Amino acid sequence: MKAVSIQDIEKLLACLNHRGFESVRNKAIVLMLLDAGLRVSECAGLKLQDVNLDKGIVKVMGKGSKERFVRIGHGVQKTLWGYLGIRQLISDGLWTDRHGNLIAAQTIKLSLKRLSQKSGIKCNPHTLRRSFAIYYLRNGGNIFELQLLLGHSSLEMVKRYLGSLQFEDAYKGHIKAVCSQLGRLDCCF
């Protein structure tokens, strides 16, 4: 299991750098999946009232009707503001087609499949969720927090992402967690 590289994410987003409705919506979806680590069904099920753009908080209804809250960054907030500015106000669902009709998870999957073909980058909704998890762990997040963010009921599911970390990641973590602290002990060296 690998994360989509930052360079590949940039290539994906470059293919969505148009002002058309679907490009704007799909860019917002890609960023939401990547930044919040949502399942495609969770993303498709979002309602307008679930997203607080001012605070960057999204209420997610996960598997088994378990509610959780996730944060989104400023870039995603800005992209969502742009999408909401051109979206028809017919549905209370967050993601719609250009006519205002709610789209399903299958539409999101198909849109990402087309984007993957266009960009040459292997990508689907779960690849973005996996990338979120791997980047989270690589940047110092722990598996207990990740379990909550992903909405997993057991740590076993989260442990699968640990296999994607490499010695380099462990080495950086060691330096950050241990060596930097021991460096403060001048009297011992």
Image (cartoon, rainbow, N blue to C red):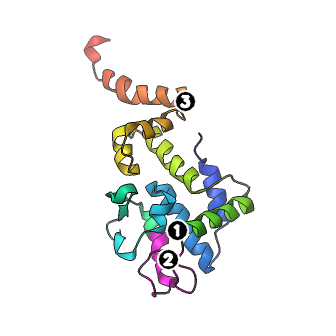
Residue occupied by mark 1:
28
Q: Nearer the viewer, mark 2 or mark 3?
A: 3
* In the image, residue 189 lies in the stretch drawn in magenta: no
Label 3's element? loop
Label 2's element? helix
Q: Say few, some or many: other residues with alpha carbon within 10 Å of mark 3 (under 14 / 14 to 19 / 20 or more).
A: few
Q: Is residue 161 visible?
A: yes
Task: Relative to 188, say whether 55 is above or below.
Answer: below
Image position of 1 (left or right of 146): right
Residue occupied by mark 2:
82
Pick whichever, 79 or 181, lies toward us.
79
Query: Pointer 1 and pointer 2: residues touching (CB < 8 Å)?
Result: yes
Q: Which mark is residue 71?
A: none
- Which comes before the other along the chain, label 1 or label 2? 1
- Hey, what amino acid is under mark 3? Gln
- Which comes before the other along the chain, label 1 or label 3? 1
Secondary structure mostly seen in magenta is: loop
Q: CA distance from mark 1 to mark 3?
A: 30 Å
- Hey, what amino acid is under mark 1? Ala
Instruction: Pinpoint residue 118: horizontal percent, then vertical percent.
Output: 74, 63
| Residue displayed at 29% across by 23% down | 184
Quadrant (top left, top right, bottom left, bottom right) of the N terminus: top right
Image position of 171 (left or right of 97): left
Residue occupied by mark 3:
166
Extent of the magenta region: 78-103
Q: CA distance from mark 2 to mark 3?
A: 37 Å
Q: Nearer the viewer, mark 1 or mark 2?
A: 1
